[in-house]
Image (cartoon, helix red, strand yellow):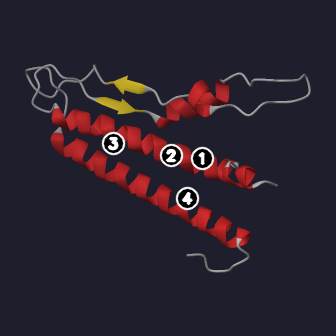
Amino acid sequence: MTIRALLEDSGTEALRRVCDYAALRHRALSHNLANADTPGFKRFDLVFTLACERRRQATLLTTHAQHIARMDDERVVGFPLVREVATTLREDGNNVDPEVESVRLAQNALLFETSARVLIKRIQALRAVITEGRQTP
């Protein structure tokens, strides 16, 4: 098994995807907070469950009748950006609650930090295996 195969296993790939999701969601939530006082602004969010559902329903790409190719997640399934237009919190049509968005940002930061730490631990474990436990500078 090659180093590339170890780094691209399903667990590492899932952690990478969660980090990508959290980074993109941070941008959407920050955008909402920046527009909390903009009349008529409707909040945006990324929906991870929709991306997972799309991935399950995606047609697998085949290179040979007996082989199934690895799907490139960025090409096949992205994270859907959803605009919440059904709600309104104020008379001007804006639906951003700064307190709720701040809580969502904090939860999202915890998701990113936790996923990144687990990913780092996986890479450190792989490094230890590769170097047979020797300390590297």
Q: Do the residues labelled 2 and 4 touch (CB within 8 Å)?
A: no
> Gap in Å between the C-alphas at discs 1 and 3?
18 Å
> Gap in Å between the C-alphas at discs 2 and 3?
12 Å
* Quadrant of image for the C terminus: bottom right
> Gap in Å between the C-alphas at discs 3 and 4?
19 Å
The residue at which mark 2 appears reads as 18
The residue at which mark 3 appears reads as 26
Nearer mark to the viewer, of 4 and 1: 4
Residue drawn at x 47%, y 47% is 19
Report the amino acid beneath label 4. Answer: Leu
The residue at which mark 4 appears reads as 119
> In the rendered image of this protein, does residue 33 appear above or below residue 15?
above
Residue 42 drawn at (x, y percent): 23, 23
Secondary structure beneath label 1: helix
* Quadrant of image for the N terminus: bottom right
> In the rendered image of this protein, does residue 78 appear above or below residue 97?
above
Residue drawn at x 23%, y 43% is 100
Residue 117 drawn at (x, y percent): 49, 62
Report the amino acid beneath label 2. Answer: Val
Tell me where residue 52 sits by quadrant: top right
> Gap in Å between the C-alphas at discs 2 and 4?
10 Å
Report the amino acid beneath label 1. Answer: Ala
